[in-house]
Image (tube, helix red, strand yellow):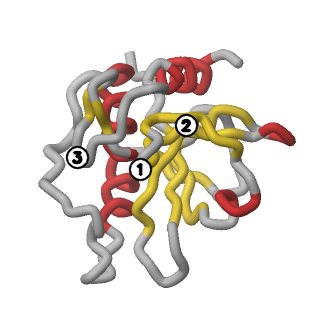
Amino acid sequence: MSGQGGRIVSAARGWIGTPYVHQAAAKGAGCDCLGLVRGLWRDLKGQEPEVVPAYTVDWSEPQGDERLWAAAARHLKAKTVQDEAPGDVILIRMRQGGVAKHLGVQARVGPTASFIHAYVRHGVVESPLSAPWRRRIVARFEFPEETS
């Protein structure tokens, strides 16, 4: 794996073992799924593009507002869900009818597909992108290309 996708996956794997801490984004100290993506942005792109307001565990579910999806669309490049590649940021709807509020980074594609994510009670892990996870993916993004 080479190029930007390889750099993203390598950087994400460096976060594995970071404990789960709601609203945090500190490699080795604690992060949630958004914090992992925020930390990768800082590792790969520099300063975060916007300040993330405080958020609750239920995210924007009571309002039915797709805030995470909207934020991802502002700063990442949207792809079709089927066009998977290492380094993609995937957005997951954890339950039918709920807002999409879980993020991960696709690490491998094909029969051994996997993704890296911060998961409650597990911290940052690399998990198989199994059918139950795959059917919950509602959007796919890639980090913007490097500019020179």
Q: What residue is rendered at 34% in x and 62% in y?
A: 70
Q: Position of residue 146 (x, y in %)?
A: 43, 23
Q: Does residue 64 sit above or below 67 in this rendering?
A: below
Q: Is residue 121 rendered to the left or right of residue 71?
A: right
- Residue 44's disc number: none
Q: In the rendered picture of this protein, how many numbered marks are placed on residues?
A: 3
Residue that label 2 marks: 116
Q: Secondary structure at mark 3?
A: loop
Q: Secondary structure at mark 2?
A: strand
Q: Position of residue 51 (x, y in %)?
A: 14, 44
Q: Secondary structure at mark 1?
A: loop
Q: Of residues 123 and 105, which is closer to you in this image?
A: 123
Disc 3 residue type (three-letter)? Gln
The answer to which image quadrant residue 132 occupies is: bottom right
Q: Of residues 2 and 56, which is closer to you in this image?
A: 56
Q: What residue is rendered at 52% in x and 75% in y?
A: 95
Q: What residue is rendered at 47% in x and 29% in y?
A: 145
- Residue 120's disc number: 1
Q: CA distance from mark 3 to mark 1?
A: 12 Å
Could you tell me if the residues under marks 3 and 1 are in contact, i.e. CB atoms within 8 Å? no
Question: Badge 1: few (under 14), some or many (20 or more) residues near its Cα, within 10 Å?
Answer: some
Q: Position of residue 6 (x, y in %)?
A: 61, 20
Furthest residue in direction front, as rendered: 121
Q: Does residue 51 sit above or below 6 in this rendering?
A: below
Disc 1 residue type (three-letter)? Val
Disc 2 residue type (three-letter)? Ile
Q: Quadrant of the C terminus?
A: top left
Discs 3/1, front = 1
Q: CA distance from mark 2 to mark 3?
A: 17 Å
Residue that label 3 marks: 23
Q: Quadrant of the N terminus?
A: top right
Mark closest to the chain's N terminus, 3 or 1? 3
